[in-house]
Amino acid sequence: MNPPCGRCNKPVYPTEKINCLDKYWHKGCFSCEVCKMALSMTTYKGFEKKPYCSMHYPKTSFTIVADTPENLRLKQQSMLNSQALYKEDFEKNKGKGFSVVVDTPEMQRLKKTQDQISNIKYHEDFEKSRFRSDAPPPENRQDYEEQPSNPERFSQPPVGQTCPAAVAPPSGGKRYQAVYSYTAADADEVSLQEGDLILNVEQIDEGWMFGCNQRTGQRGMLPANYVRPV
């Protein structure tokens, strides 16, 4: 049985049949819905299962939605729901936002390079802080040849040994107070705590001094920029 034509509903015979848009058409009936211009399989445009030419093909247009009170309420409610979902997801994923980095040979090389750069930077900063001189300049030192009236009483013990904390220094001995804490790095150095009193201080060079920590009784070298004169 021959199917009906999509336009005239008459039977369509195989010799004149066009199968398009889920329908069968006579060659003469396959034309534009508006201008009735004859179409072919390469010139038609389908819309809602009807053929159109390119000139009369329906153009879709957007509908303008008015900002009515109901629409504004729905918009605000949608925004509140979005914020609530965002906060909920944020709380669930808190602390889980770290990506797993594959330990590839390239990543290992970059990590090793960064470690080397960090070590170099650390040593540079350490040397700068060791030799900086931000303490106030010391007072003029008296001649080293001046000796106390009783040399036995104020004699200096060897490096690393304790000095008597109860014995007062001579009038010519310099006294300094620690303004920073310092941990001795070598056996010939003394450790300091902020506020320690240093007795019988002698200037070695611009960055180092020699003195006795009254609190611990230890005598040795100490950094000059960690103490101030009193």
Image (cartoon, rainbow, N blue to C red):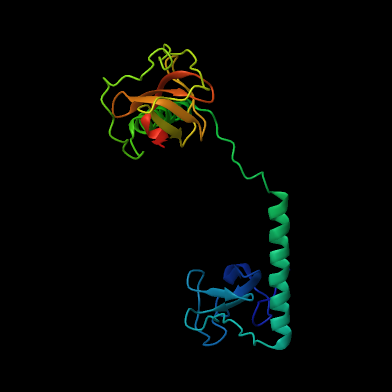
Classify 114 as above or below 220: below
- Answer with the quarter of the image where residue 153 lies: top left
Classify 137 as above or below 166: below
Classify 17 as above or below 141: below
Q: How many labels does the image show?
A: 0
Which quadrant is home to the C terminus?
A: top left
The residue shown at (60%, 69%) is 20
Percent position of residue 24, x then y: 64, 71
Q: Is residue 2 visible?
A: no
- Answer with the quarter of the image where residue 123 lies: top left
Going by the picture, which residue comes out furthest to the front? 149
224 to the left or right of 103: left
Query: Relative to the observer, which residue lies in front, 112 or 68?
Result: 112
Percent position of residue 73, x then y: 73, 81
Q: Is residue 55 visible?
A: yes
The residue shown at (72%, 61%) is 85
Classify 104 as above or below 77: above
Query: Relative to the observer, which residue lies in front, 214 or 93?
Result: 214
Query: Relative to the observer, which residue lies in front, 124 or 167?
Result: 167
The residue shown at (32%, 29%) is 207
Which quadrant is home to the N terminus?
A: bottom right
176 to the left or right of 72: left
Percent position of residue 127, x then y: 35, 29
- Answer with the quarter of the image where residue 51 lies: bottom right
Percent position of residue 7, x then y: 64, 81
Query: Relative to the observer, which residue lies in front, 195 or 230?
Result: 230
35 to the left or right of 188: right
